[in-house]
Image (spheres, rainbow, N blue to C red):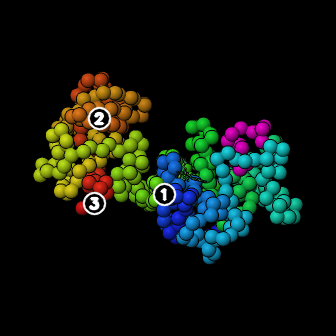
Amino acid sequence: MAHVRVNNARKDYGAFKAIKGVSVDIRDGEFVVLVGPSGCGKSTLLRMIAGLEGITSGDIQIGKHIVNELAPKDRDIAMVFQNYALYPHMTVAKNMGFSLRLKRMPKAEIDQRVGNAAKILGLENLLERYPKQLSGGQRQRVAMGRAIVRDPAVFLFDEPLSNLDAKLRVQMRSEIKEMHQRLQTTTIYVTHDQIEAMTMADKIVVMKDGLIEQSGSPLDLYDRPANLFVAGFIGSPAMNFIKGSMTNEGFRTTDGLILPSERSPPTAVTYGIRPEDIKLVDDGIEVETVVVEPTGSETMVIARLGAQTITCVFRERIRAAPGDMLRIAPAHNAVHLFDESGQRIDS
Ligand code: ATP
C-alpha cells in the first residue's frame, strides 16, 4: 500500500499544454476519481502516474519514492484499461497469471494468487475459458483479476466500464467498490461520468483544460461547488443557472422576476438551484410547464421562468400538462450564488 503525491506536474506535447501544474495528494488506501470532460487531461495525468507518459516538470511520488524516472514495471502499480487488452490465445487463468510468470514466480504461488483473485471476482468457473467465450463484464473482471494478482501498491483504472452497457456498468461499479473495500488498495480511477465519480469515490478531483477545478468528497462537491463549472458538472440533471443581480428584495432575474434568497451578497450575478431542490409551494413563483417526464419514482418538469428554461425534479407524481402553471420555490438553504468570475460566494 502507498500514498501517491503529484506535485506541480506539467505535461507539454510540443506547444500544447495538456497538464498545466497539477498537485494532488492521495492517501494510502484512498479511492480517488479523476473526472472531467473529454480532453481535460485526466487520462494523461493517470498515464503520467503510471509512467506511460513522461512528465515535463514537477514530481510524482509513490510511497517513499519519487518515480519520475522509473519505468512503469518498477512503480508497483497495476493498470486496468478500457479495452481490457486480454491475450486472445490464453485462457482466463493464463491471462491472469501472465505478469507473474514473467516475474518467474513459482507456479504454486501463481496458482494460489490466481485462485484468490478468481474467488474475489467470481471467476472460479471460467478459468479455463478463452476471452472470446466471455461476456463483456466477465472480460472486464479478468482484466481486474490481472491487476489484483500482482498485489500492487496502487491500482490505476482508465475508464474501465465505458465499453459495458448501462446495467452492467452499475453492477461493475459496485463490484469495484466492494473489491476496494476488501483489498484497501490505493486506487486512482479515471472517468468522464460524474455519476460513476459520485458513487465510487472517497475523493473526486474535477479537471478542466489541464487544471484542477476542485477536489473533495462527493458530497462536498455537490453541496459546495467552488465555481460554475463544478456546479454544472456534478449533479444530474445539471444545476439551473439563472442570470441577474442581487437586490434588497431578493435576486432579480434579467427579466425582472424576483427569486427568493436567504443571503444577499451584492456581487452575485448567477443564481444556481439544483432541479431536486425546487419544491412546489402555494405561494411560490409562477412558472409555465413545457415538458413533463414521469419516471415512476419522480417527475421531471421543464418549465419557463420568464424567458429562461429551468429543470425541476419533484419527488412526487404531479399532474401537469404543457402550458399549465406551477408555483415553485427553492428548498431551505439550497440556493448557490456565483459572482461575475463564476466563483462561488459563500458568505
Ligand atoms: P477523454 O475522456 O476524451 O479520454 P481526457 O481528459 O482523458 O479525455 P487526455 O487523453 O488526457 O484527455 O488528453 C488531454 C489533451 O492532451 C487532449 O487535448 C489531447 O488531444 C492531448 N493529447 C493527448 N495525448 C497527446 C499526444 N500524444 N500528443 C499531443 N496531444 C495529446
Residue 25 vertical placement versus 238 (above, below) = below
Q: Which mark is residue 309?
A: 2
Describe residue 316's horizontal placement relative to residue 32 as left or right.
left
The disc label shown at residue 38, or none: none
User: Callout 1 environment at 10 Å: few (<14), some (14 to 19), or many (20+)?
Assistant: many
Q: Position of residue 212 (x, y in %)?
A: 45, 60
Kind of residue indicated by mark 3: Asp
First to last magenta residue range: 131-143
Callout in the foreground (2, 1): 1
Q: Within 10 Å of the Cα at label 3, are there few (<14), some (14-19), or many (20+) other Cα atoms? A: few
Given the image, on which type of amino acid does mark 2 rest? Answer: Thr
Tell me which numbered mark, 3 or 1, is placed earlier along the sequence.
1
Q: Amino acid at mark 1?
A: Gly
Q: Relative to residue 6, is residue 181 depicted above or below? A: above
The image quadrant of residue 342 is bottom left
Label 3 and label 1: CA atoms lie apart by: 26 Å
Chief SS of the magenta region:
helix
The answer for how far apart the CA atoms under marks 3 and 2 are is: 25 Å
Question: Percent position (x, y) of residue 135?
Answer: 71, 38
Task: List the residue tagged with mark 1.
Answer: 210
Q: Quadrant of residue 44?
A: bottom right
Residue that extends furthest to the left in the rendered view of this protein: 248
* Quarter holding residue 77: bottom right
Return the x and y of residue 2 as percentages of the image width and height. 62, 70
Of the two numbered discs 2 and 1 on the same chain, state the one appearing first in sequence: 1
The N terminus: image quadrant: bottom right
Looking at mark 1, is its residue's CB closer than 8 Å to ligand 1? yes
- At a point 42% along the width and 49% down the height, the residue shown is 234
Of mark 3 and mark 2, the one earlier in the sequence is 2
Element type where label 3 sits in the image: loop
